[in-house]
Amino acid sequence: MLFVICIIIGKGCKNADQSEVPTLVNGELNWLNIDEMDAIEAPSKKKYLVDVYTDWCVWCKVMDQNTFTDEEVKAFLDKHFYVVKFNAEIQDPVEFGGKMYEWIPGGKNGINTLTFLLLGRRPSYPSLVFMDENKEKISVAVGYHDPEKMLEVLKDMVTAVGSKG
């Protein structure tokens, strides 16, 4: 019933069960959007990996096809991260962390200003933004990562963050 009410109102619902969002569904990554990520109560049980992409980015598509389908990568992500997709050029306003981010014209397709929060003033695609359990940015990994390199980056991230806690 709560789910139906949230859809009718048109807002995401925040409740204790939101932190139970599965990373894998039927063996595939369950990519959240920024709204769904924002609805997870902080602190969550996992860290976040935000895949910042554009529709025209060839290497973004290659990473989707080759890296994010790899069984070892999926299993590691399932254990340690919520996975989030964010299109840097989305024209709809995006709310994140209680602030609104708008699309602005420029370049070929414009850019949503949330991209600057995630990637800084010189965005590059694909980029992976690692965030802690409180949705605070830890670091950014830029460029294509094959499955082997992705596992290395993910393990380094979990080890580095784990040693700080």
Image (tube, rainbow, N blue to C red):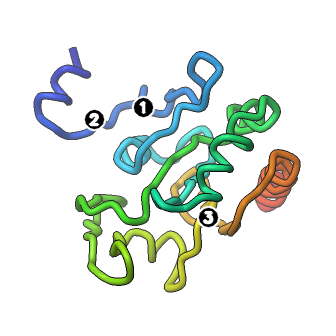
Q: Which residue is mark 2?
A: 13
Q: Residue furthest left?
A: 9
* Precedes in sequence: disc 1 or disc 2: 2
Residue 18 disc label: 1
Taking the image as shown, residue 51 lies to the left or right of residue 9, namely: right
Q: Which residue is mark 3?
A: 127
Q: Quadrant of residue 65?
A: top right
Q: Secondary structure at mark 2?
A: loop
Residue 151, position as x, y percentages in the image: 83, 47
Q: Nearer the viewer, residue 23 or 159?
A: 23
Q: Which mark is residue 8?
A: none
Task: Give the image location of residue 6, x and y in percent.
Answer: 20, 30
Q: CA distance from mark 2 to mark 3?
A: 28 Å
Q: Is residue 104 left or right of residue 18?
A: left
Q: Is residue 117 above or below residue 89?
A: below
Mark 3 is on which residue type? Ser
**Total marks placed:** 3
- Residue beneath the point at 61% across and 64% down: 127
Q: Residue at 88% of width from left, 48% of height from top?
A: 148
Q: 120 or 161: nearer the eye? A: 120
> What amino acid type should be assigned to the residue bearing mark 2?
Cys
Left of 8 or right of it: where is 116?
Answer: right
- Between disc 1 and disc 3, the foreground one is 3
Q: Disc 1 residue type?
A: Gln
Whether residues under marks 2 and 3 lie with C-beta atoms below 8 angstroms apart, the answer is: no
